Image: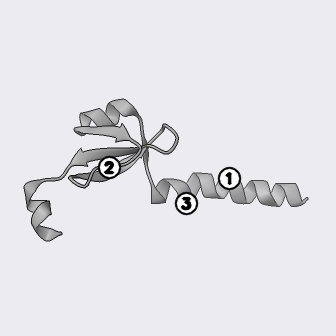
Amino acid sequence: MKIFYYLLHFLCYVTFILPATCSLVDADRCTKRKGLCKRNCLMSEKQIDTCFSPSKICCSERLYEEDDII
């Protein structure tokens, strides 16, 4: 019975919570958004999304207007 309880929690997490907190993108979609899948973004880049590849994120160049905010 406990296994069904844990399975239900896992399925709820994967179905509802995980998609709401981060969206996974493939490398082609990241490239279409003018980004690259990397392990770490440079200081001159910002994180857009999380890539399908393990521990990689989609990084894009910061716009000049965003540099003034930081």
Q: Which of label 3 and label 2 is nearer to you?
A: 2
Q: Position of residue 20 (x, y in %)?
A: 47, 58
Instruction: Characterize the local packing of mark 3: few (<14), some (14-19) or many (20 or more) Cα atoms within 10 angstroms.
Output: few
Residue at the image point whose x is 37% and y is 32% from the top:
27
The residue lying toward the viewer, choosing from 11 and 28, is 28
Which quarter of the rendering shows the N terminus? Answer: bottom right
Numbered mark located on residue 41 in the image: 2
Q: Circles 3 and 2: CB distance less than 8 Å?
A: no
Q: Amino acid at mark 2?
A: Cys
Q: Which of label 1 and label 2 is nearer to you?
A: 2
The residue lying toward the viewer, choosing from 50 and 42, is 42
Q: Position of residue 47 (x, y in %)?
A: 32, 52
Q: Amino acid at mark 1?
A: Leu
Q: Amino acid at mark 3?
A: Ile
Q: Position of residue 8 (x, y in %)?
A: 74, 57
Q: Residue furthest top?
A: 28
Q: Earlier in the sequence, mark 1 or mark 2?
A: 1
Residue at the image point whose x is 31% and y is 50% from the top:
48
The residue lying toward the viewer, choosing from 55 and 27, is 55
Numbered mark located on residue 11 in the image: 1
Disc 3 and disc 2: Cα gap in Å?
A: 25 Å
In the image, is residue 10 above or below residue 58?
Answer: below
Residue at the image point whose x is 12% and y is 53% from the top:
63
Q: Earlier in the sequence, mark 1 or mark 3?
A: 1
Numbered mark located on residue 17 in the image: 3
The residue lying toward the viewer, choosing from 28 and 13, is 28
